[in-house]
Amino acid sequence: MGNSLSTAFLPILLLAFLAMMFLTSRKQRRQVAETQLMQSNLAEGEVVTTTSGLRGTVVDASYEETIDLEIAPGVVTTWLRAAVRDKVNTDEPTEAEAESSDHDAEGTTEPAAGETPGGRPSA
């Protein structure tokens, strides 16, 4: 009896595994296609991040397989388009900028004599 139960369960388990593999591969193919589309549509002035983590501004995207990135003022390097991981959205503040503006909003003035940093009188 135990043997027939495991034989009935095996095809169901195999079918579930194949379904997961199919769905995972579809998602991965869609992500690859989106990345390739982004890489082929790069334009001058866009800020991008490479697969090695380098951030630069596209200064020449006229070649089919390569782009020129300015990584520092006056420093231009040539990269394969495939090395571009994503575009950087320059409209949104970075995490460091947002944190900096939070500290400015809190008021970073020094406490007066006899006060704690929270503005309460010291004991």
Image (cartoon, helix red, strand yellow):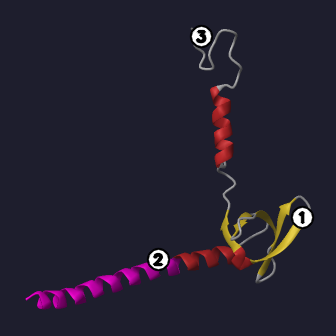
| Label 1 or label 3, whichever comes before in sequence order | 1
Q: Identify the mark at residue 15; answer none if there is no mark.
A: none
Say which quadrant the N terminus sits in.
bottom left
> Alpha-carbon distance for marks 1 and 3?
54 Å
Whether residue 9 appears in magenta in the rendering, the answer is yes
Mark 2 lies on residue: 27
| Residue 19: % across, % down | 34, 83
Report the amino acid beneath label 1: Val
Report the amino acid beneath label 3: Ser
Q: Which residues are magenta?
A: 1-30
Report the amino acid beneath label 2: Lys
Q: Identify the mark at residue 75; answer none if there is no mark.
A: 1
37 up-or-down from 103: above or below:
below
Query: Image quarter for residue 114?
Result: top right
One can see residue 45 in this view:
no
Which residue is located at x 68 percent, y 60 percent? Answer: 88
Mark 2, Cα crowd under 10 Å, few <14 / some 14-19 / many 20+, is few
Q: Main secondary structure of the magenta part?
A: helix
Q: Nearer the viewer, residue 77 or 113?
A: 113
- Give the side of residue 29 with respect to residue 86, left or right: left
